[in-house]
Image: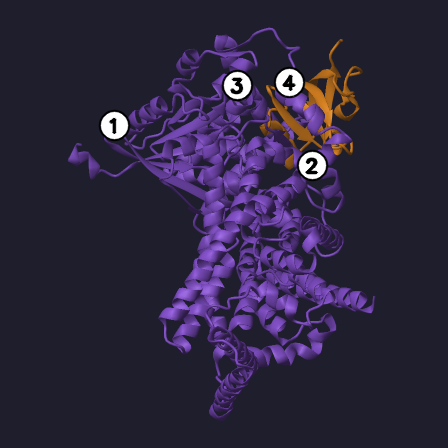
Amino acid sequence: MPDTICLRHLPLGSKAEVRRIEAHGELGRRIRDMGLVPGTEVEVIGRAPLKDPVALRLKGFTLTLRNNEADFIFVEPAES
Amino acid sequence: MDTRKQGEKPLVIALAGNPNAGKTTLFNAITGARQHVGNYPGITVERKEGCVTCGGHKLHLVDLPGTYSLTAYSQEEVVAREFLAHERPNAVIHVLNASALERNLYLTVQLLELGAPVLLALNMMDEARAHGWHVDSEKLSRLLDLPVSETIARTGKGVDELLAKAGEYARENTTGEWKPLTISYGPDLDPVIDEMAQTIERDQFLTERYPARWTAIKYLERDDAVLEQGRKAGDTAHKLEELAKRVAEHCRATLNMDPEAIIADYRYGFISSILKQGVLTREDRSERIMLSDKLDNVLTQRLIGPIIMVAVLFAIYHLTFVIGEVPMGWVESFFGFMHDTAAAALPDGLLQSLVVSGIIDGVGGVLGFVPLIMIMFFCIAFLEDSGYMARVAYMLDKVFNFFGLHGSSVMPFIISGGIAGGCAVPGVMAARTLRSPKEKIATVLTAPFMTCGAKLPVFILLVGVFFPTHQALALFCISMAGWTMALLTSKLLRCTVVRGPSTPFVLELPPYRLPTFRGLLIHTWERTWQYIKKAGTVILAISILLWALMTFPTLPQEQAARYEAMTETAQTETLASAEAQGLSAEETEELVAASVEAVSNEHAEASLRHSFAGRIGTALEPVTQWAGFDWRLNIALVGGFAAKEVVISTLGTSYSLGEVDPEATGSLAERLEADPNFTVATAVALMIFVLIYAPCFVTVVTIARETNWGWAVFSTVYSTITGFILAVVLYQAISAV
């Protein structure tokens, strides 16, 4: 899939749709429990003062995760 | 009222829901003051319960810990699930945040799969509407075939109707028969789930607890808690694990997915198929920026965010000390009055000494800080309930992660006294939200370095005496020293004895909300009450014990007689000299009192030195003199291991013991100031030692419960040695200047 990029590289303020999640075990479960599953629309709405963690908006709420956790999530950026 | 119904067993209603969905606010709105807090048996997850009467029926409400899922991997989730499966409440009110309905329903699906009689409380409907969401609750009720109520817990809107509905629903469900929901998990999993369910039914495997299909799904999800229960239950476990393993391999080979991921996808699919049938619609205002986001643009901004954070923490200090001073004065005067009254009412002797020095001064020294602690807790409750605390975790995670901790370690640290005035006992308990045992150990072992409410009186006292012009700043520095110590220690621990990878920082940032005054008061009161209870029980017992240690053995008779003789001599001598000078009756009385007091202080000191405590303190002097601690301080510090509050009350007792004149209740501060051996160097060394040395006994027990006794002993020894070394270094350095 040439159009997917890693969530870490999604610029601040842009939207994308989740395509694949390659996290297993606890991280994978936690991510899914919070509603981050393929097909979900996410928007990067902020980064912490030290650039990490990152804040995402999805399904009407705000979720935070670290950059190295975002590495497991592949998204397709929305056409802007 | 119908008397027949009053005797009935109350209906049990559980409150479940995601964190930040307003569950606690709803619980408070329903139960008000009729609630009590305890722990689940055997573990330390908080258990809140309350009773209400509704339509002639007694309802027993249990507030379950907030969870996102029933797939257990944190203690909260295990507790919520086991309560439902084991205690089988008559109804479960699931509180949902209506503006994040899709994710919240994920838990609903799991509750329904377990078979629980669920009714939904669509909470925060006002917020959802403001964000442009439209929820058709009737349709949702029809599609899921369960009662749905709309509520706004903050204002209490819809709460009565919800309660009536819940009572009704619970009454219908007294038979205890649960009807689990069945949803399809697709062609790859459905056949195997059926096969597993049949095996489970046939072998009666865990069926007294969970529905068969539910257990099958948990095996596919590789739920550790269920796997473990299963292994204890019998051989069927082996068969099921084998089956689950085969399916997992198949799924990975053909779909490149774990069964758990497939299950989650189908659950969300089920939810979205319901929502798309007209339950959830959104007005087209996607470009609308929410107020919460606007606030975040400032409050978590790269440069301004951290500055505001420090300013907020500093402001809390100022607020506490400026406002707190007034009521603290009242409480102090009250205990001063008690002291005087008791001293006047009781005859001189052991009983008077026990009541006045042991009980009133001991407990009063602790309770004097209640007003300060209430204000501090009120501020912290405000930060928590408003959502700002989550931002603090978000902003600090990078730093914490560097020290081998988790952003969520901020909470245990802050509760322990990161903002001075907490308590390490609930702080250590708060660490159980940390998933990784390694990060948890590091947090639990370092949280007691914070300035808890029991150390605070020592600091306030010493700072007041030695740094009167910079009180707030000095206290701020002490708190920072606590933080530095905690972070450096945890880095050290995570590089040596508790090595291991860090756990995910997948957290929700709740929108900013103005906390309800009632919620703040309940939170403040709960914690203050814990403190008062501790003062009333543990501290009282220890005060009395320490008083006994400081009183017995009493001076040998001939020595006591000598002091009595000295008192008499002083009295007659002063009288004679006053007469010679021709002083008035008043002046004479004053002079006599002063001379008698001087002798009696000498007497008191001699008695204390002679007592058990004095002997312990004196025996330690050769070591502790390096840090500038004399035998009196040693007594206080040894007592402080029992409970840090005792440090101050023991000092108070040791400086006031033997006092005869009830009018001269000069404060401990004045006495310390007057003591020439008590220098700035001593004060600083004492403060650092109190900050760092062994956690109080209650905390040690809590650490042992949360980890094991090995770590508890480690924590005690490690911190005492570190504290002593730092105290010696500081004392010698400052004395040399």
Q: Is any part of residue B298 visible from this angle? A: yes
Say which of marks 1 and 3 sits in front. 3
Percent x, y for residue A51?
A: 78, 31
Residues marked 2 and 3, same chain:
yes
Residue shown at 79% from the left, 65% from the top: B734
Element at label 2? helix
Few, some or many residues within 10 Å of mark 1 (<14, 14–19, 20+): few
State how far apart marks 1 and 4 are (Cα).
44 Å
Percent x, y for residue B604?
A: 53, 79
- Mark 1 belongs to which subunit? B
Mark earlier in primary sequence (1, 3): 1
Q: Which chain is orange?
A: A
Dot 1 amino acid type: Gly
Few, some or many residues within 10 Å of mark 3 (<14, 14–19, 20+): some
In the displayed structure image, the side of residue B47 where residue B414 appears, left or right: right
Percent x, y for residue B337?
A: 43, 61
Residue shown at 20% from the left, 39% from the top: B7
Which residue has dot 1 on it?
B55
- Mark 3 belongs to which subunit? B
Q: Are marks 1 and 4 in contact (CB under 8 Å)?
A: no
Dot 3 amino acid type: Glu
Which residue has dot 4 on it?
A40
- Mark 4 belongs to which subunit? A
Dot 4 amino acid type: Thr
Element at label 1? loop
Element at label 4? loop
* B6 or B219, nearer to the observer: B6
* B559 or B305, nearer to the observer: B559
Q: Which mark is residue B127?
A: 3
Say which of marks 2 and 1 sits in front. 2
Residues marked 2 and 4, same chain:
no
Q: Quadrant of residue B674?
A: bottom right
